[in-house]
Amino acid sequence: LREKEHETRIRLTQPLIQPEIWNNYGMKSDLNEIEKLKTRMYKRQLVNEIKKAYYNYFKASQVVDLYKKIIDLQYENLRVSEKLLSVDKATQDVVYRAKAELSRTEQEQMNVENLQRQGRSYLNFIINRPLESEIRKSENKIVQDPAVFDYEAAKNLAFLNREEIMQIEKAISATGKNAAIVRSRYFPGLNAVVDYGFQGTEYQFDEDSDYWMASLVLQWNLFRGFQDKAKLEQVYLEKKKLSTREEEIRSQIE
C-alpha cells in the first residue's frame, strides 16, 4: 500500500432483480391506505357521535318539559288537597302524600336538567363551540321508514363500504406482501453498479487521477440462522389473526 492514498467517488446503484423492493412498495401502499381509512372511519364515528349527542340533548329537553307539566299538575293537586283539608273533606296524610310526590318529582326534574346541561355541553364540545352555546332544533322532519331497507342489500352494502372491513382487508394484503418480502430473501439479488471517481497519492482532480468502473453485483444469503423461517411463521400467524378479526367485524356489522 502507498503511504498516502485517497479515493473520492460517486456510485450509482440500480437494482435489477430485487423482488423485496417491489413487495415492500406494495406493502407501504397498503399501509398508507390503512391510515387514510382510519381518518375516514374517525370522521364517520364523529358524525355518528354528534347525531347521538344532538338526539340525547333534545330527548332530555322533552323530558324536562314533561316534568314541568307534571309539577304544575302536582301543585294543583296539592292546592286542592289543602283546600279539602281546610273544610274537613280530607285528612292530613293526603296533603303529606301530595307534598312528597311533588318533592320527588322536583328532584327528578333537577336530575334531568343536569343531564340536559351535560348533553348541551358535550354536543358543543364535540362540534368545537363554547359549552353554553344555544342548540337550535333542526327543522328537518324527514323520517325514513325501516321497511324500505332490505336486510341482505343493507348488509352487503355495509360490507362493501364500511371502513373497518376495508381497513382489515388492506392489513391482510399488507401482511401477504410482508410474507412475500421474507420469502424473497431466499433468492439472490442482482444490482448494476457504476462508479466514477478520483484516486491517487495527492488530493487532486484531473484526467490522470480519474477512473470509472461498471459491475454487476450478485448477492445471495445462503444461511441466516433460520431467521427468515421464524419471521415467515410469525407473518403467517399475524395473517391468520387478521382473518379471524375480519370475521368478527363482519359479524358485528351484521
Image (cartoon, rainbow, N blue to C red):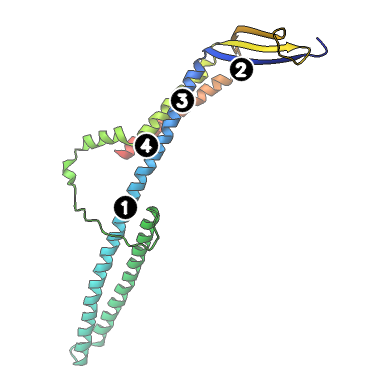
User: Which residue is label 3 attached to?
Assistant: 27
- At x 42% / y 33%, what residue is drawn? 34
> Residue 243: percent from the left, percent from the top?
40, 29
Q: Are marks 4 and 2 in contact (CB under 8 Å)?
A: no
The amino acid type found where label 2 is placed reads Arg
Q: Is residue 179 visible?
A: no
Above or below for 198 versus 115: above
Q: Quadrant of residue 162?
A: top left
Mark 1 closeness class: few <14, some 14–19, many ≥20 residues within 10 Å = few
Q: Quadrant of residue 136?
A: bottom left
- At x 19% / y 53%, what residue is drawn? 141
Relative placement, left or right, of 9 versus 35 is right
SS of the residue under disc 1: helix
Furthest-right residue in view?
3
* Inter-mark Cα distance, 4 to 1: 20 Å
* Inter-mark Cα distance, 2 to 1: 56 Å
- Looking at this view, is 202 or 190 the one in front? 202
User: Mark 3 or mark 4, which has the lower sequence index?
Assistant: 3
Above or below for 86 versus 66: below
Mark 2 closeness class: few <14, some 14–19, many ≥20 residues within 10 Å = few
Query: Which numbered dot is residue 164?
Result: 4
User: Mark 2 or mark 1, which has the lower sequence index?
Assistant: 1
| Nearer the camera: disc 3 or disc 4 | 3
SS of the residue under disc 3: helix
User: Mark 4 or mark 2, which has the lower sequence index?
Assistant: 4
* Inter-mark Cα distance, 3 to 4: 18 Å
SS of the residue under disc 4: helix
* Inter-mark Cα distance, 2 to 3: 23 Å
The amino acid type found where label 3 is placed reads Met
Query: Which numbered dot is residue 224?
Result: 2
* Inter-mark Cα distance, 4 to 2: 37 Å
